[in-house]
Amino acid sequence: MPEIASNKGYKLVVVAPVYDDAAAATQLLRQLEGAFLERNVDLRIMFVDDGSPVPLSEQLEARGGVQVEVLRLRRNVGHQRAIALGTAYVHEHVPCDAMLVMDADGEDRPEDAAELVARCREDGGQRIIFAERTRRSESGLFQAFYRGYQLLHWVLTGIRVRVGNFSVVPAERLGALATMPALWNHYAAAIFQARLPRSLLPTVRGQRYHGKSKMNFVALVIHGLQAISVFIDVVTVRLLLTVCVLACSIGALLGLTLAAKFWAGFALPLWAPYAFGGVLMIVLCATLGSFFFTLGFLAQRNSLDFIPARDYRLFVEGIHKVSPARDKVFNLYEERDSLSAANE
C-alpha cells in the first residue's frame, strides 16, 4: 500500500466505471469539481473505461484544477468487475486518504458524494460509509421486483439489502478489500462478507444525466444473483437446515399417521401412509443431496480464485492522463509498461 504523499488537504480518489458514455463522464467531472470546491479536498478522478468501443480518454473533456485519469481495460468485464480492477489499481498505485466509488451516470449525486466524504473524515477513516437510498426514482414495476429481490436476499443470506456501490472506503481498508475474491463478483457484498466496519448515510437517488440505462432486465437479475452468490456458503447451509427441518416434520407426520392407523384404530385412507412415506423418501434424498452440495461449496473456500490485488494487471491495458487542455490526451507509457512487465 503506497503511503500518503503529503498532508495538504484530504487526498481523495474517485473511481467511476464507464462504458461508452463519455458525455455522462464529462458532466460528472464538472459536477464533482463544484461539489468539492470548498471542501479542502485534493481531488483525483479515475474513470475505469470498461472496454468502450471508442476509448474514453479520446472523448473526455477535462478542465484544469483536478487530476483526471482513465484506466483503460483490455475488454468489457462488467460494472462490478470494473470496480474491482479500479480498487486494486488504487490500492497499489494511488496514494490517498480514501477512495470514493460511484456511478458516472448521475444517479449517484456529487453533492451526496461530498457528504459521504465529510462523514468519513469525521469518523477518522475507521469505517466504510455507504449511501443508503431513502427514495428511489425507478418505475413502480422495477421497485416491485426490487422489493422481491430484497426479500429473497434476506431469506437466503440473513442480510438486508440497503446499499449499492456508492460509498467511501478509507485507505486503511483498501488492502483488505483488494484481497477479497468476492470483490470480483460484487463490490458491496464483498464488504459485507469481509465484515469490514461500515455505516450508512441516507441519500436520494439522482436522475440520469441523459439517455437510458444499458442494463436490461436479464442483466439486473444476474447482478442480484451475483450478490447472493458471494454468500453461497451461508445460502447452502440455510437450505440444508431447511430441508432437514422439512424431513423431520414429514417423518413425524408419518409416524403419527401410522400410530393413528395401527394403534389408535383410526380409519385413515389406505394411501395416506404410502403418500407420506414417498414424500419422506424424496425429502431425505434432497437432504442428502443438500449435504454434499454444501460440503462441496465449503471445500472451495480452501482455494483462492481471482484475487484483485494479484491479478488485476491481466485486464489493464494502460492508464491515460487527461490534460487540462481540451482534446489533448496522452498516455502514461511508463505505468502501462510497468504493468505489462509485472504481468509477464
Image (cartoon, helix red, strand yellow):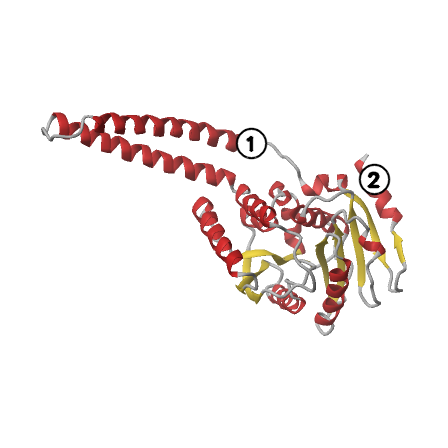
Count the numbered circles shown: 2
17, 69: nearer the viewer: 17
Q: Residue at x 83, y 39 (%)?
A: 340
- Is residue 40 depicted above or below 296 in this figure? below
**What is the number of the mark on residue 30?**
none
Residue 291 position in % (x across, y down): 43, 29
- For residue 229, what is the image quadrant? top right
Rate crowding at label 1 as few (under 14), some (14 to 19) or many (20 or more) other CA atoms within 10 Å.
few
Q: Is residue 7 visible?
A: no
- The quadrant holding residue 34 is bottom right
- In this picture, residue 85 sits left or right of residue 337: left
Which quadrant of the rendered structure holds the C terminus?
top right
Side of 123 where 49 appears, left or right: right
Secondary structure, mark 2, is: helix
Three-letter amino acid code at the position of disc 1: Gln
- x, y percent for residue 289: 43, 27
Question: Which residue lies under the disc numbered 1?
Answer: 300
The residue at the point 47 percent across, 32 percent down is 294
Residue at figure coordinates x 90%, y 59% from the top left: 328
Circle 2 crowding by C-alpha within 10 Å: few under 14, some 14–19, many from 20:
some
Dot 1: element: helix
Between the residue at mark 1 and the residue at mark 2, the CA separation in whole angstroms equals 30 Å
Amino acid type at circle 2 is Ser
For disc 2, the marked residue is 340
